[in-house]
């Protein structure tokens, strides 16, 4: 979103500097453009705040993850969506907990923004080798083939969390069909004995 805003401020400025650029119409359009930019920057600020909170880990210290995840789902539940959460025994470290929190934050936000769902289910399990997280909604779904175009228009939420998951050695799989809801599955391998990798201690 910051890159998109940068592009838009540069375009606005160029338009106004151009010879004869300061017509009343252009100035009105520039004011509207600035208002949109303000709204976007407020959203970025709110996101960063959430992210810093998650990174600081104050909410998601060991044992507190389930509570922190439930909190993320409160707005959906309050808007009338039926929310089911099942979080198994997790023995993962603070970095993994922070990643799980970040992924759920984005997925829940997407359900609230795009899905118009009646029901959402979050399941997290951990076995010896990996953490598996699945978030399913029964909303309107979307065509995954359209994702590239959405990203070019600055919709980067899923892409950014996918990159973070991949940096940690995991995968994020999005399955969606128009009219049939969306399912996102994250798999995160945990470092076993003798394994070195981003999650190894
Ligand atoms: N749960 C969902 N239900 C329906 N459509 C979805 C869902 N999640 C994502 N989408 C679709 O996938 C697109 C990409 O999602 P993504 O999170 O990358 O971007 P965004 O939410 O639109 O914007 P941003 O996350 O950058 O604020 C969305 O614009 C929306 O069309
Ligand atoms: Mg999003």
Image (spheres, helix red, strand yellow):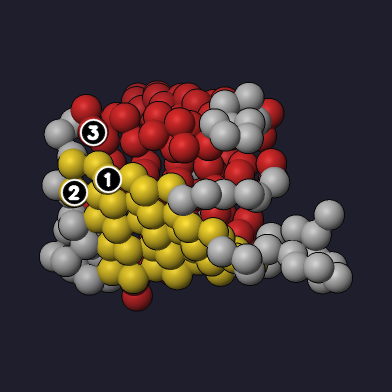
Disc sitting over residue 96 in the figure: none
Mark 1 or 2: the one toward you: 1
Residue in view at x 47 percent, y 37 percent: 66
How dense is the environment of label 1, judged by Cα within 10 Å: few (below 14), some, or many (20 and up)? some
Q: Is residue 122 above or below residue 29?
A: below
- Which residue occupies 50% across, 26% down? 46
Q: CA distance from mark 1 to mark 2?
A: 8 Å
Q: Say which residue appears at 48% left-offset and 58% top-offset.
A: 125
Total number of numbered discs in the rendering: 3
Cβ of mark 3 under 8 A from ligand 1: no
Give whichever of discs 3 and 2 has the lower sequence position.
Answer: 3
Q: Quadrant of the C terminus?
A: bottom right
- Position of residue 133 measured from the top left corner of the image (x, y, whole percent): 46, 58
Mark 1 or 2, nearer chain start = 1
Q: Position of residue 47 (x, y in %)?
A: 52, 32
Location of residue 174 (image quadrant): bottom left
Q: Are marks 1 and 2 in contact (CB under 8 Å)?
A: yes
Name above or below for residue 68 compared with residue 198: above
Q: Nearer the viewer, residue 171 or 113?
A: 171
User: To which residue does mark 2 refer?
Assistant: 119
Closer to the camera, 34 or 77? 77
Disc 1 is placed on an element classified as: strand
Vertical position of residue 149 compared to residue 11: above or below? below
Q: Is residue 162 left or right of residue 194?
A: left
As helix, strand or loop, the secondary structure at mark 2 comes to strand
For marks 1 and 3, give the CA distance: 10 Å
Q: Which mark is residue 84?
A: 1
The reply to whether discs 1 and 3 touch (Cβ–Cβ < 8 Å) is no
């Amino acid at each position: 979103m910051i890159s998109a805003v940068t592009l838009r401020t540069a375009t606005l400025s160029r338009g106004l500097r151009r010879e004869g650029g300061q017509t009343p119409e252009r100035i009105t359009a520039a004011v509207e453009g600035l208002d949109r930019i303000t709204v976007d920057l407020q959203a970025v600020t709110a996101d960063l705040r959430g992210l810093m909170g998650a990174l600081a880990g104050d909410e998601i210290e060991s044992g507190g993850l389930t509570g922190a995840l439930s909190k993320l789902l409160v707005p959906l539940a309050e808007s009338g969506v039926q929310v089911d959460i099942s979080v198994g025994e997790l023995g993962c470290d603070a970095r993994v907990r922070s990643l799980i929190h970040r992924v759920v934050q984005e997925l829940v936000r997407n359900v609230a923004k795009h899905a118009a769902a009646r029901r959402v289910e979050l399941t997290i399990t951990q076995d010896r080798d990996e953490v598996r997280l699945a978030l399913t909604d029964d909303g309107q779904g979307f065509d995954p083939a359209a994702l590239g175009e959405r990203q070019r228009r600055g919709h980067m939420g899923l892409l950014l969390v996918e990159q973070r998951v991949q940096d940690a050695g995991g995968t994020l799989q999005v399955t969606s069909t128009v009219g049939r809801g969306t399912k996102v599955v994250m798999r995160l391998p945990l470092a076993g004995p003798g394994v070195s990798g981003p999650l190894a201690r």
